[in-house]
Amino acid sequence: MKVVKNLVAAFSMKAEFASRRNKLYRIAYSWSHDPVLADDLVQETIYKALKNASRLRDVKTIDSWLYRILYNCWQDYLRVKGRNVEFVESYDDESADQTDNYQQAQIVKRVRASVEQLPLPLREVVTLADFAGFSYEQIAEITDIPIGTVMSRLFRARKNLKQQLLEFGSDELTVSKLRRVK
Amino acid sequence: MNIKDMTEDKLNLFIDEQLDTDEMNEIREALLDDKELREQVCQLKAVRELIGYAYSEVPPSRHEDSNKKRSGSIFGRAIAASVTLVVGVVLGWSTYEYSPNATPAISAQNTFQYVANHVKAAYGERKIVLHIDSSDVQVVNAALNEADQLLATYRKANTPMKLDIVTNKSGINILRPGVSPYIARIRELIDDNDDVAIYACNRSIAKALKKEGVEIVLMPEVTKDKSARELIPQRLEKGWVYIKA
C-alpha cells in the first residue's frame, strides 16, 4: 500500500513540475538568451527536483523551490564557464520570424537587448520580479541574497532599462513618422 | 506630498505594492495632482510590463517543439493573440494623443504611458478610469477622443473593458444640459456602450451650487453620490488604470 502511495505521490509531483516547465524555460532563456542552454538548465532542474522531491516539505512553496534549483543550476554553469561569459543572442530567432509585424519584433528585440546589457545579478532579479512575478521575499529565497540587495538590484535594473527604452521610444517614433509620411 | 520628496525607490515600492496602506494612499493622492509623478510611475510600470511581454514568446525549447508536433500549442496561440493586441497598440503609437497639450509629435514618455495603459489588456478585462477636471474645449475633446479610441481598440480586440468617466471641478459642466455642447456626444457614448459609466463629484456640485446660487442640473445618466477623491482611489486600489485628461 505504501508503495502505491509513493508512486501516486511521485506521479503527481512529476505533473506539478511538468506544468511549470514552460515558465522555467522562459526564465532560463531570459537569463541566458540561449535556447539550447535554457533547455539544458530546465532539464537539469526537473531532474534534480524529482530526485530531491522528498525534501519539499510544503507544496505551497513549490515555485520558489523549483526556481531556487534552476538558479543554482545557472550559477553552477556560470562558475564552470566563468562569470564573464558573453551571451550572444541570435536576433534572427524563430519568434522574430514568426511575426509579420516589423515594429512589434523590433520592440521585443530591443527590450531583450536592453535586458541582455544588464549585469547578470540585475538581470536575474528583474526577470524573476517582472516576468515571473515573484515577491521580494521569494526572490531573496531563490537567489539567497538579502531582501535589501534584491530591492536595490531590482530598482537599479529598472532604472537602467527605463533609460535605454526611453531612448528607443524616441527612435521608434521617428521611424513611425517617417513611414507615415512615405 | 511633493515630487521632490519622492525617491524613485519609493515609486518602485509603490508599483510593487510594498508600501503600507497609508503610504500607498498618500502616493495615489499625489498622483491625482502631479503630472510629472504620474509619468514617472507610468514609465516604471511600462518597464515592468515590457519585460513580461518581451519574454512571453521565446524560441521554443526542444521539449516544446516535440509537443507542438504532437498536438499543437494552445499556449502558443494564446501568446500569439496577446502579441496581436500589442501589435495594435504599437501601431497606435503613431496616432496617439494623450494630453490635450500634446504637440502632434509623440514623446517617448507618451509611448511609455500608452504601453503602461494597454499591454495588460491581453490578460483579461481592462478597467479604466478617465478623469476630467476641466471644461476646456481642448481637454474635453482630447478626453472624449481618448474614450472613443479606447472603446474601439478593445472592441476590435474582443477584450472586455469597463470605462468610468469621473468629472470634478469645472469638468462637471460638460454634463449640464443647456450649458454643455457635449451632451449628445456623451449620451451616444453611454447608449452605445453598456460598460461606460459617468460620475460627477458631489463636492464639486456643492461648490458650483454655492457659487452660482442655482441648482446644478446634470444629465440623468450621471451618478453623483461621491467625490472624485473617493471614487478614483477606490478604483486604483482595485487595479483600475488611471488616465488624466
Image: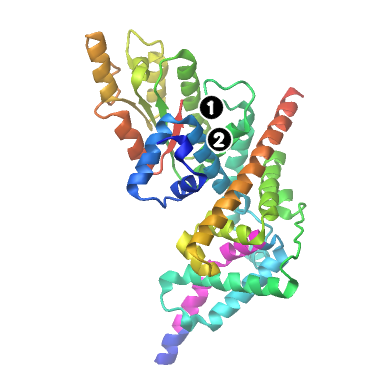
Residue B131 percent coordinates (x, y): 41, 28
Residue sticking out furthest to the front: B5
Mark 1 or mark 2: name the one nearer the start of the chain: 1
Vertical comparison of B196 with A82: above or below: above
- Quadrant where the N terminus of chain B sits is top left
Q: Magenta span covers which residues?
A: A8-31
Residue A2 sits above or below residue A166 on the image: below
- Proximity of marks 1 and 2: CB atoms separated by less than 8 Å: yes
- Residue at image x 57%, y 22%? B102
* Residue at mark 2: chain: B
Q: Secondary structure at mark 2?
A: helix
Disc number at residue A147? none
- Taking the magenta stretch, the answer to whether it contains residue A23 is yes
Q: Is residue A181 above or below residue A135?
A: above
Q: Which residue is mark 2?
A: B114
Which mark is drawn over residue B98?
Answer: 1
- Picture residue at 74% right of the left edge, 28% below the top: A179
